[in-house]
Image (tube, rainbow, N blue to C red):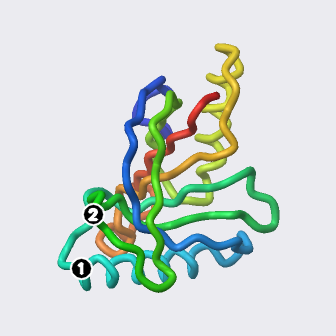
Amino acid sequence: MSILDQQPALIRTTDQPTAVVRERVPMANLREFFGRAFGAVMAAAQAQNTSPTGPPFAMYHGMPTDTVEVEAGFPVSPDFSAAGEVISGLLPASDAIEAVHKGPYDTLERTYSLILERMSAEGMTPSQTMWEFYLSDPVQEPDPAKWQTRVVWPII
């Protein structure tokens, strides 16, 4: 089974306002952080009578080591206001390489490697930030082999 629906592709993203919780998180605690962050952002959005405008995502700042600087939340409308630990953010407009990963989260490294191979082959320089949109809800789709994650890695 292929981990990608298609080969990594060059895309142009547009600015996308977000509502996020941002922290430095041990890699072993990412799942707990995501659950807490996504819940906090949903509560803040509901309190403002608004809804996310896209799927949940995580934006990574720098290459993960034992810990990673990460923000997790949802795309929102531009009129969203920060509330408590939930802050306003932005997925910036950029040229990027994108791939849709199929399978469990612990195999995402293979998709990142394929994206880096494409960048290297074309002489592109990867940004220090990258993000993942979680297109599958593990509660509604319990089979990790069917999960889909859209990976977007800007180039500089």
> Looking at the image, how many numbered discs can be counted on the residues?
2
**Circle nearer the N terminus (2, 1):** 1
Image quarter where the C terminus lies is: top right
Q: Indicate left or right for 76 with 88 as reference.
A: left
Image coords of residue 62 (percent x, y): 72, 51
Foreground of the two, 15 or 63: 15
Residue denoted by label 1: 48
Location of mark 2 (residue): 79
The vertical placement of 149 against 100, above or below, is below
C-alpha gap between disc 2 and disc 1 = 10 Å
Q: Are marks 2 and 1 in contact (CB under 8 Å)?
A: no
Q: In the image, what residue occupies the spot 41% across and 67% down?
A: 19
Determine whether 108 is above or below 144 in the image.
above
Q: Residues within 10 Å of mark 1 (few under 14, many from 20)?
A: few
> Residue at 62% across / 59% down in the picture?
106
Badge 2 amino acid = Asp
Badge 2 element: loop
Q: Residue furthest top?
A: 122
Q: x, y (%) of residue 144?
A: 45, 62
Along the line of sight, which residue is nearer the eye, 128 or 56?
128
Query: Residue 131: where, in percent of width, then height?
Result: 53, 50
Most foreground residue, 47 or 71: 47
The amino acid marked with disc number 1 is Gln
Mark 1 residue element: loop
